[in-house]
Image (cartoon, rainbow, N blue to C red):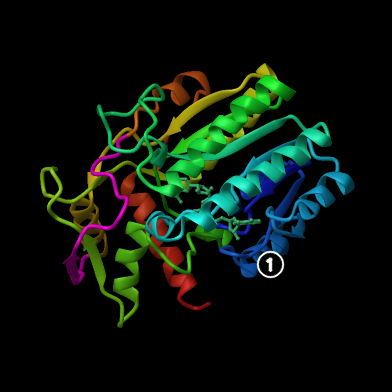
Amino acid sequence: MILITGGAGYIGSHCAVEFLKNDYEILIFDNFSKGHREIIENLKLKYNIVFVEGDLRNKADIDFVFKNYKIDAVIHFAAFSEVSNSVLKPDIYYENNVLGTLNLLNSMVENNVLSIIFSSSAAIYGEAKHIPINEQHSLKPINPYGKTKYIVEEMLEDYDRAYGLKSIKLRYFNVIGADYEENIGEWHDVETHLVPNILKSVLKKDFIFKIFGDDYKTDDGTCVRDYVDVRDLVYAHFLAYKYLKDYKKSDIFNLGSNKGYSVKEIYDTVCEILNCKIPYEVVKRRNGDPQILLADSNKARNVLNWSTKKTLTESIQSAYEWEKILKNY
Ligand SMILES: NC(=O)c1ccc[n+]([C@@H]2O[C@H](COP(=O)([O-])OP(=O)(O)OC[C@H]3O[C@@H](n4cnc5c(N)ncnc54)[C@H](O)[C@@H]3O)[C@@H](O)[C@H]2O)c1
C-alpha cells in the first residue's frame, strides 16, 4: 500500500487517482488544513481508498498509520505552500513543512519503510542565474517556503546516508489543469496561483484578477513561469515510484514543460480560449516572487522516460471546467 500525505489537496488527489487507475492500494493521510473533505468523498464514490485523518505535526498520528497498515512507499505532498504568506509567517512554514516532515521520516525509519517521493519546488532555486534551470543550478531560495523545501531535501540526503532511506525529490515548476472528469482540481481557499485566479474573475462577479508587478526585467514586464499540467506531473510520480523500486537509488528531477510564459501571455491565452475580455488590475510586486522560473526537465525525460502530453490550451480548458464545478461547492 502506498501512503499519500496531503492527498485531500490539489496534486495529491490527482496522484492518488493516477495510482488507483493503475490498481495500486492507496492510503491518504491529511488533516484538511488546506485540503477538502469533498475531494475524499468524491474519490471514495469511485475508488476503494483508505483515508486517515491526522496531522504530521503530531508524530503519534503518523505512527498510527505505519503501525496499522503495511506501507510500501510514501509520496509526500503535505505542506503549506503560499509563498507570500511564508514571508509573513515563517514559523508556521518551518513547523509544518520541516517538523512535519521530520516526524514522517522518523516514523518511516522506525517502521523500516525506506522509499519516499517528495514534492519539492522550483522555489528552491531562488532567482535564476541561468535559464533554463537544470538540477545543477545553485540553490538559493528567496522565501521561507523555498527554504523549507531546501531543508527537507538536505534532510533526505542525510537520512539516505545514515539510514538508507531512498528518496526521489521532484522539483515542480507551476502546476496547472485539473482532472475535472474525476471531480478533482485545484482548490486552494487562498488562491495564489495564476490560472485559477484569472478564471475566478470570469466566474465570480466580485472578483478582479490582479497582476503582481509589471516592472520586471522581462519582455512585457510581468513574471515568467513554466507551466506543467497536473495530469502529466502525477504521471512522473508513477515513473519515479517504479524507478525507486527498480534502482533503489535517490535522485532529483525537475518537472516542467521547458516552456516559459509571462503572466500577460497566460492572461491573453485565457481570454482567447474563452473568447472574452477579462478585467484586471496591476498592483505592486508580491514578496518573494522570482522574476523568471523556466525548467530544464530533460533529466526526467531521459532518465524516467517522462514526457508532457497536455497543451497549455488543454490545461486551461480543464481548469475552466473544474472552476465551473467548484463554483457549486
Ligand atoms: N501547486 C503547485 O504549483 C506546486 C508547485 C511546487 C511545489 N508544490 C508542492 O506540492 C505539494 C502539494 O501542493 P498542492 O498545490 O497540492 O497543495 P494543497 O494545499 O492543495 O495540498 C496540500 C495538502 O496537504 C495537507 N496538509 C498540509 N499540512 C499537513 C499536515 N501537517 N498534516 C497532514 N496534512 C497536511 C493539506 O490539508 C492539503 O490537503 C506541496 O508540498 C507543495 O509545496 C506545489
Q: How many marks?
A: 1
Residue closest to the eye, 312 or 282: 282
**122 and 58: which one is in front?**
58
Relative to 270, is 200 on the left or the right? right
Q: Is residue 251 magenta?
A: no
Q: Residue 272: horizontal and vertical position, in percent?
A: 20, 59
The extreme right residue here reads 68
Name the quadrant of the N terminus. top right
Span colored in magenta: 275-294
On whether residue 276 falls in the magenta region, the answer is yes
Q: Amino acid at mark 1?
A: Glu
The reply to whether residue 239 is visible in this rendering is: no
247 w.r.t. 328: above or below: above
Q: Write down the residue under mark 1.
A: 41
The part of the image, by quadrant, that contains residue 169 is top right
Q: Position of residue 150 (x, y in %)?
A: 48, 36
